Amino acid sequence: MKISIVIPTRNEEKSIKEIIEQCKPFGDEILVVDGHSRDRTRYIAEEMGVRLVLDNQKGKGEGIRAGLKEACGDIVVFIDADGSHDARDIPIMVQPILEGKADLVIGSRMRGGSDELHGDLSKFIRIVGSDIITLTINYRFGVFLTDTQNGFRAIRKDVGLKIGLKENIFTIEQEMIMKTLKHGYRVMEVPAHEYSRKYGRSNIVVWKVAHRYLWCLIKNLF
């Protein structure tokens, strides 16, 4: 099975080269899906010889769908462009899929640790909200997951295309898990440490998107 590594980006010129270099040993293909960056992100990607696709500027969810559609591999790995994930975890992540034990594998920060989830009120609210969503998914589908929001994950391409992803923002990550389970596919976790991003700030403003996370949870429960 061939592995495509998809890196969704938007204005990540300071980190994208390093991320691409880190990913090269672990995939048959690297695909950068760019959200129409206003800096040099996509030019750097092209200079490094990887495939580049522009999304429709609807958000990260659109980037994920574009990556699934355009990827050539049987397994698609998603890794953020901000340096918070360690590409050396990719082999561990894809192994359960290669062995036929899982269809979607999440890199769990709760099992692997995080430098980004703790330290201020915004992060506290974020982790509490994430735990509520995770608990709800566990009870609804009879699973025991610890992290439903991490963007570092691997999925069989045919599964990713079949489940009908619709969300346009970061809520696509919990939608992917819920729809994978609803369709009867298997979801597993592996430990993955989350590092502090090296440049810039997170694009997630908790109080602005909390209602969208809640609505995504409710409408995908049944």
Image (cartoon, helix red, strand yellow):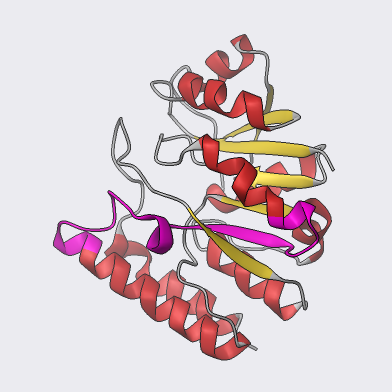
Residue 47 visible in the snapshot: yes
Q: How many marks?
A: 0
User: How far from the left and from the top, in percent, is residue 47?
Assistant: 60, 9
Query: Is residue 157 depicted above or below 131 in this figure?
Result: above
What residue is rendered at 57% in x and 59% in y? 106
What residue is rendered at 78% in x and 52% in y? 98
As rendered, which of 101 and 220 lies closer to the eye?
101
What span is in magenta?
Answer: 96-123
Residue 66 visible in the snapshot: no
Say whether residue 203 is left or right of residue 6: left
In the picture as drawn, the residue positioned furthest to the left comes out as 120
Q: Does 30 appear in magenta?
A: no
As rendered, which of 97 and 153 lies closer to the eye?
97
Q: Does 115 appear in magenta?
A: yes
Query: Is residue 13 depicted above or below 70 in this figure?
Result: above
Answer with the quarter of the image where residue 21 lies.
top right
What residue is rendered at 32% in x and 53% in y? 114
Query: Is residue 77 depicted above or below 179 in this figure?
Result: above
As rendered, which of 82 and 142 lies closer to the eye?
142
Say whether residue 99 is left or right of residue 180: right
As rendered, which of 114 and 68 lies closer to the eye?
114
Quarter containing the N terminus: top right
